[in-house]
Image (spheres, rainbow, N blue to C red):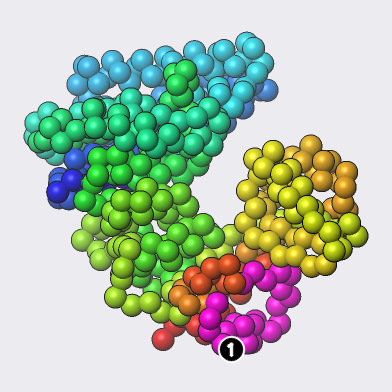
Amino acid sequence: MKVVSKFGGTSMADAGCMLRSSEVVIQQKSCVVVVSATSGTTNDLIQLAKTSHTGSWTEAVAIIEKIIFRHQKIAAELVLTPELNKNLEQLFSEMKSLAQGINLLEDCSLKAMDKMMSFGERMSSVLFVQALNHICKNEKAIFFDVRTVLKTDDQFSKAKPLTSEIIELCKIHLSDEKLKNKIYVTQGFIGLTKDNATTTLGRGGSDYTAAILAEGINADSLEIWTDVAGIATTDPRITNKAKPISEISFSEASELATFGAKILHPATLLPAMRKNIPVFVGSSFDSKATGTWVKKEVKDYPLFRAIAIRKKQALVTLSTLEMLQTHGFLFKLFEIFNKHKVSIDAITTSEISVSVTVENDVLDQKELFSELSNFCEVTIEKDLSMVSLIGNNINHTPGLAQKIFGCIADINVRMICLGASRHNFCFIVNENDGNAVVQKLHDQLLVQ
């Protein structure tokens, strides 16, 4: 059995968390372990880069000292070996040198930001090797730089993995023979271009890394260990009536992740789906809890499985009379969005207008909206929430809309998207109404 396990930032938060996570690794007989940065470190590294760029060097040094102190404290509690301690100190030195370079050049490119953010996972993986060897009682854990196999394009901050190259490199560096009786500890979130520049896969990319490696070594299962015991019917922070889901299909889980569920990175399931690798989601703080299995085939396919919400959404409406009985307008629109590398989440059309949803952050792209304004009228509404009902056979169930909107008759709905998927029905509401909508729908449709 080849098991790939991934541990999130809260599972790496301190020495105690690392030792607890190490026990899970041994219990699950994992052969490859992917770790995130220690809790809060990625945010600190982003702040370090920004402060080095536009703030004072004194402020930057304070952030550097904060990051070093956090990791030295864990290192002292784990009693790092001289070799691992040397590796950690080298990373501290590289981090400081990069910050100095950003400060002196007064420039922080996406390339530099990716390199800066990589230090979080690189430091935590050094520490976790020692934690794991404490539990193993021998030097069974091996530090492995994921960039040896995880090659990407050069789209910094959102790099695309080069799947075929990764699979071939895994055959060499993570072969069955090399994995035998060893545990390879490596980093999530980061990769390397053909020119040896460090990249990142985007926030939440550690899940994706684990899935890519699971595909690369043809694993029997992929495990995602977090601070919650599996996937729930909705965000438990919104309603205490949220219920655990014991198993869910790849199709449902993909929709759930894409439309707002924080527990899985949206791209995570793609490599697992390609190789039909079952994915387990559980809590490293309670490894005996049931958790959730994500599989190709499951026992039950309910009409409603879960409700997701994506906040900080914007609705962009593009209108022109040129759309009327003509062709090519949508092509032009999508060509512009593609040029600016903007992903559209939902879309509806009428005779003379198109409405699309994007993240609020996209509104900062002035060149995009200037280009759109050249040939159509652009109207923007921001601070909205997209609520998505995830389930099965949704687009072929009569009376569904009446059931849903009857629950929220007092809420204004700005846009509805139905029909593209049998697993999803989504609509847009004001962000202030989002949580209330989820609570009402959950009570009526998912609480038995």
Location of residue 262 in the rendering, given as x and y in whole percent from the top left corner: 47, 56
**Relative horizontal placement of residue 23, taking residue 126 as reference (left or right):** left
Q: Can you say whether 16 is above or below 308 in the image?
A: above
Q: Is residue 43 visible?
A: no
Where, by quadrant of the figure, is residue 398 drawn? Answer: bottom right
Location of residue 11 in the rendering, given as x and y in whole percent from the top left corner: 33, 45
Where, by quadrant of the figure, is residue 367 drawn? Answer: top right
Q: Can you say whether 408 is above or below 182 in the image?
A: below
**Which residue is disc 1 drawn over?**
399
Residue depicted at 39% across the width and 73% down the height: 243
**The residue stretch that appears in magenta:** 395-418
* Amino acid residing under circle 1: Gly
**Relative horizontal placement of residue 434, taking residue 267 as reference (left or right):** right
Query: Which quarter of the rendering shows the C terminus?
Result: bottom left
* Viewer-nearest residue: 274 or 12: 274
- Callout 1: SS: loop
Where, by quadrant of the figure, is residue 250 drawn? Answer: bottom left
Location of residue 109 in the rendering, given as x and y in whole percent from the top left corner: 62, 23
Q: Is residue 396 magenta?
A: yes
* Viewer-nearest residue: 142 or 80: 142
Residue depicted at 75% across the width and 60% down the height: 355
Residue depicted at 62% across the width and 22% down the height: 108
**Relative horizontal placement of residue 267, taking residue 23 as reference (left or right):** right
**Relative horizontal placement of residue 299, taking residue 59 as reference (left or right):** left
Location of residue 405 in the rendering, given as x and y in whole percent from the top left corner: 64, 82
* Viewer-nearest residue: 301 or 396: 396
Residue depicted at 71% across the width and 48% down the height: 334
